[in-house]
């Protein structure tokens, strides 16, 4: 049996994005862009509801990464490409798959809503060290 995360392993974390979470993220980020905080402005742009903050959606991947890597790992780098705007009420399935394992862990990221891939990306996790 091998210890630790291995290439090919994956985990998916699903979450429906809500108005309450949007409000929390607005407070954390300070972003008051109308697309994210004004339903009428978002609908005027053709969206059915307010857009989900991209970084809030991306944060769901941090849960998948942490659960897959286990304790002792931290995000070293992460990048996303969004195919379209996500809107409140949509459920995002954030999947992280280990692509490479050495002194760091490389991941491929895929986000789906109702079977449609809406996010793709990459991440690298590094061991936590006490060197500060």
Image (cartoon, helix red, strand yellow):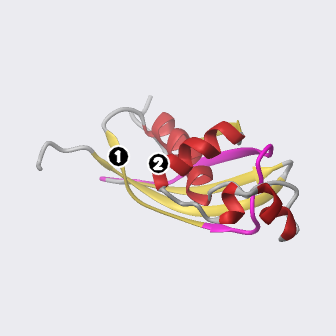
Q: Distance of mark 1 from mark 2, alpha carbons?
A: 21 Å
Residue 30 in the image: state x and y as whole percent: 48, 56
Identified at 80% across, 43% down, the residue is: 89
Q: Secondary structure at mark 2?
A: helix
Magenta residue span: 81-103
Mark 1 is surrounded, within 10 Å at the Cα level, by few (under 14), some (14 to 19) or many (20 or more) other residues, namely: some
Residue placed under numbered mark 1 in the picture: 74
- Residue 17 horizontal side relative to residue 121, left or right: right
Residue 16 in the image: state x and y as whole percent: 74, 38
Residue placed under numbered mark 2 in the picture: 28
Identified at 86% across, 63% down, the residue is: 43
Check the picture and name the quadrant holding the N terminus. top left
Residue 92 in the image: state x and y as whole percent: 73, 46
**In this picture, is 1 found above or below 26?**
above
Location of residue 44 (image quadrant): bottom right
Residue 90 drawn in magenta: yes
Residue 9 in the image: state x and y as whole percent: 57, 42
Q: Secondary structure at mark 1?
A: strand
- Residue 35 horizontal side relative to residue 61, left or right: right
- Residue 99 horizontal side relative to residue 38, left or right: left
**In this picture, is 122 found above or below 97?**
below
Q: Nearer the viewer, residue 69 or 60?
A: 60
Please identify the residue farthest to the left as the structure is shown.
131
Q: Earlier in the sequence, mark 1 or mark 2?
A: 2
């Amino acid at each position: 049996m091998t210890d630790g995360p291995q290439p090919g392993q994956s985990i998916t974390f699903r979450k429906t994005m809500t108005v309450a979470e949007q409000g929390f993220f607005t407070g954390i980020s300070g972003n008051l862009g109308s697309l994210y905080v004004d339903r009428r402005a978002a609908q005027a742009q053709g969206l059915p509801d307010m857009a989900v903050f991209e970084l809030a959606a991306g944060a769901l991947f941090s849960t998948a990464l942490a659960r897959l890597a286990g304790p002792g790992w931290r995000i070293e780098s992460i990048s996303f490409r969004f195919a379209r705007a996500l809107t409140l009420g949509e459920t995002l399935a954030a999947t992280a798959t280990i692509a490479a394992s050495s002194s760091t862990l490389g991941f491929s990221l895929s986000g789906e809503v109702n079977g449609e891939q809406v996010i793709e990306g990459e991440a690298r996790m590094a061991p936590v060290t006490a060197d500060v």
